[in-house]
Amino acid sequence: MIYHQKLTDDTEDQLSLASIHYLRNHYQEATDIYKRLLLENREYLALNVYVALCYYKMDYYDVSLEILQVYLQQFPDSVVGVNLKACNHSRLYDGKAGEAELKKLADKQGISITQYDNDLVRHNLCVFRSGENAMQILPPLIDAIPEARLNLIIYHLKNEEYKDALQLMKDIEPSTPDEYILKGVIFACLGQIEDNREMLKSAQQYFQLVGASSSHCDTIPGRQSMAMCFFLLKQFDEVLIYLKSIKAYLFNVDEFNYNMGIAKCASGHYKDAEEHLTMVTNPKFKSEYSYIMALARSYIYNGKPRLSWELYLKLETSHESFNLVQLIANDCYKMGHFFYSLKAFDVLERLDPNPVFWDGKRGASVGAFQQIVAGREPRDNLREISIMLRNTENPQVEYILRAFKKWAKENGMKVRSILRVRLRLSTLRVFVLQLIFVTLC
């Protein structure tokens, strides 16, 4: 601050002040100084690059390109200028668009882009290609380009190498929004895997620091950070406020739809939850436990219990599939989808002869029968209902089946077909699941 007070209005002093603002991530303050100097010194064309870089950092990519073009018209071969243009294009469109701009530099020398001898170009080409050859390109650049370390951390995160990411980040005391976000992501991932509450609390605080900052509160990363902060706090209504504000920019991104779907389901907005969850295309995301549970619940509350049952049938037998069938049993019962509730309680009862499961199974069978009588379910279901009841050794079963038999005779159904018991493929599945469940216990 002592030297700060000694600064004058000289161009050199003001440029120094602007650079300090930039290094402190105070991009708007730096922009104000550069623009004022430009008004006074139109011939200082390089100032356009500095202003464009500030706007790029503030996520105003269109504005950055417009200002940058003034400089590129005079110096079209500038590596710094073309690189910044490429970065803007990658943000506005995709990595291929960014690579196309970098390729122009190599074309003028008659070489391929991979032969272009420039650290900055090599680094950004790796980024534009989604981390291609990252382990060969980025480590040697860590001490030359600050972003190389951060992008290597991102590469490890994308490959679920969380310990490696933490190793690269552990000695860094976050000072920029990107560093806070990355440390938050690492702690959030490891905290959930290891059930480490301290890590999760730290992650929430890192996200909050970025999302609540005046410089990033209105940016896409800032709002994503606040959404993740409230996600970790399980305040899902708040999560939705921030995710909705950036939906227009990320509506076709799997990570966004995954998070939006989970938050919608947790907030009871099941129709929207189903819409977002079914937009996810990444097979890994679709196989995750939280995704399957949220989608199954959404199907049930949206009147599609059959689809939730199909999710269960596709799962490999595990403790997670036991939890899913419990969810189906209870949620279907609550929503009046008694036939599928009965199927789920039948599985549960054979895995664990708990009287609670028999109570649920009995209630679901009676509820399903009432829906058949009312014409809301097909009569053919009565046969399967009877088979599932026969799986239980309880005197109450005979009383229930007599009522079924009496109604069937009065309504022209073949009684023997209702009482016939046959081994089903789903029974074999239950036997396997039972063995695994016993082992887990």
Image: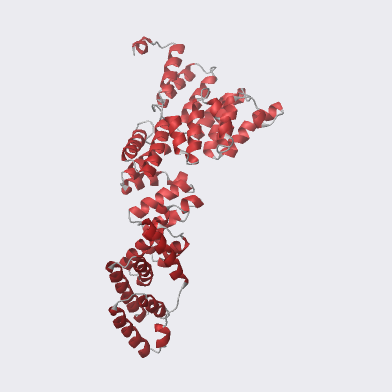
Residue 400 in the image: state x and y as whole percent: 30, 81
Residue situated in front as seen by the camera: 386 or 208: 386
Tally of numbered discs = 0
Q: Quadrant of the C terminus?
A: bottom left
Residue situated in front as seen by the camera: 57 or 330: 330
Residue 412 in the image: state x and y as whole percent: 40, 90
Residue 141 in the image: state x and y as whole percent: 54, 25
Say if 165 sits above or below 43 in the image. below
Say if 223 sits above or below 430 in the image. above
Q: Quadrant of residue 71?
A: top right
Residue at x 58% of width, y 30% of height:
137
- Give the color scheme: rainbow, by chain, secondary structure or one colour: secondary structure
Residue at x 33% of width, y 82% of height:
401
Residue situated in front as seen by the camera: 93 or 178: 178
Q: Quadrant of residue 323?
A: bottom left
Q: Quadrant of residue 317?
A: bottom left
Camera sees residue 393: yes
Q: Is residue 48 left or right of residue 293?
A: right
Camera sees residue 272: no
Residue 374 in the image: state x and y as whole percent: 34, 80
Residue at x 54% of width, y 32% of height:
87
Q: Quadrant of the N terminus?
A: top left
Q: Is residue 71 left or right of residue 24?
A: right
Residue situated in front as seen by the camera: 46 or 24: 24
Say if 67 sits above or below 304 in the image. above
Say if 95 sits above or below 333 in the image. above
Q: Is residue 381 left or right of residue 89?
A: left
